[in-house]
Amino acid sequence: MRSHGQAAWELLLPSVDAPARQRGRALQEALREAVRSGRLAAGTRLPSTRELAADLGVSRGLVTEAYEQLTAEGYLRSGRGAGTWVGEAARARRTDRTGAVDGRLGPGAGGGAPTLGARAPAPAPAPAPVGGAVGVRVDFRPGTPDLSLFPRAAWAAAQRAVLTRLSHPALGYPDPRGLPELREALAGMLARRRGVVADPERLVVCSGVAQASTLLGFVLRARGLDAVGIEDPGSPEHGRLFASTGLDTVWLPLDEEGLRPEPLAASGVRAVVVTPSHQFPSGISWSAGRRAVLLDWARAVDGYVLEDDYDGDFRYDRAPVGALQGLDPERVVYAGSVSKSLAPGLRLGWTLVPEALLGEVVERKRTMDLGNPVLDQAVLAELVTRGGYDRQLRRCQRAYRERRDALLGALAEHLPGTRVSGIAAGLHVIARVPALFGPPERFLARAAEAGVALRPLEDYGTARPADGDVRLVIGYAHLAPSAVTAGIRLVAEAVGRE
């Protein structure tokens, strides 16, 4: 194994020149890039936090935070009393761009049928929530942001600025990849906020994660794949989207760290869609070890991972864990959107595509819709480059954290013993209500009669344990804190435990 010598801190010295408020992020990005480029090779031992802080002239806490962040993302590894080392996860990206045909999945390379029993058919639409829309007083169904937070004034100002300067030729048929200035702006933002490897030439503007999924599905189906793996529990929408491209879906079980390795290896699939930063719906953040296992699997089977960066920007207790794509941008297709930060009705998102897939994805995008509307792309580019989008994210984070806190307080007061799982992030929680408030069927029926719309965890995958506990996926982002509290009180009164 290599020792650090002086190589590590010499590579990181430029980060010290960043403004004080940005120095921690600059140090983290310098470390990521040093690992990605191979300047810090796998197996290199890094200086202790005390040594590196002294060498760089920064606080020890800043170095500790950087080490912890990159360990969570899989770039580094550490052990009690064993120091901090460069991990293995990112190493193969520099050398392994494998495939029988120039890194590509050729026709007939499907790998056979999955071995977890019969492949799951395309999932039917998720069951309608108990209570329906009529007569609903409080709606806890997840998936909807607070649309009143949309920055109307900032959007209107950006639109006026864009209309003033946009040339007439710019209003013609666009580059199917998207407006160049938007791709540049998004690439910079995603590298800064999510730790991705963001080449604007490999970024495709699309109509949200849904279109990113279907674009990839069509490309993989044309290459001979016949199935894709999805997380269990996970979003049934992924299955429906891939079914529309001709791909079957295989449910792959999760545990508290991420996809379980054995079922993944036995599945026979060569593509999976995952939500590792804040898994939907379980709320976990994948461990560094499971991230590494997933990437090793993708390289071994010559496959691809679609990373749906669900809620990646909304972490309330610490900095968000960086995106999986940064560890291997040749195996990970990264997708995100403004649906939760601005509004789903804008239909604006992005996908970062491995080089081997780029041409096919762009051509499929061109034939699908000739590209996204130029004016909306230009307005978003204006918001990103002028700082308006960052301000909007901060505004949403404050509002959603307040609502999450209100939900946790209401559950503790009115449904005591309820356990909330997952990290402090996103727009929903998993609440496990004790069996004494059940059984689940009675609980949901009583809540519906009281005018409260709830969605059980069972709607998002295969059957859950029959232990009598009531497992709920509770969305809170679209509700005022007072409405959150009132809704939980209504549920408690309805189930007879107030």
Image (cartoon, grey):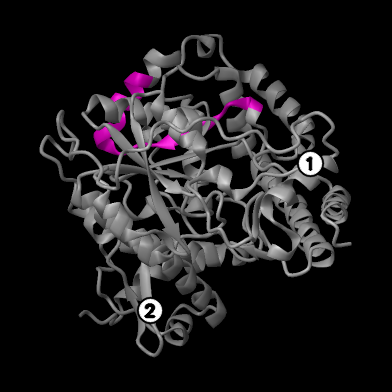
24 magenta-colored: no
- Percent coordinates x, y for residue 346 in the rendering: 63, 26
**Label placed on residue 155:** none
Type of the residue with mark 1 = Ala
Is 82 or 215 nearer to us in this picture? 215
Q: Earlier in the sequence, mark 2 or mark 1?
A: 2
| Residue 267 image point, x, y percent | 27, 48
Q: Can you say whether 467 is above or below 80 in the image?
A: above
Residue 211 visible: yes
Quadrant position of residue 253: bottom left
Find numbered disc 2 in the image and state the secondary structure of the residue it sits on: strand
Which secondary structure type mostly characterizes the magenta part of the structure?
A: helix
**Residue denoted by label 2:** 78
Please give left or right for residue 3 compared with residue 233 in the image: left
Q: Is residue 359 magenta?
A: yes
Residue linked to disc 1: 448
Magenta part of the chain: 345-364
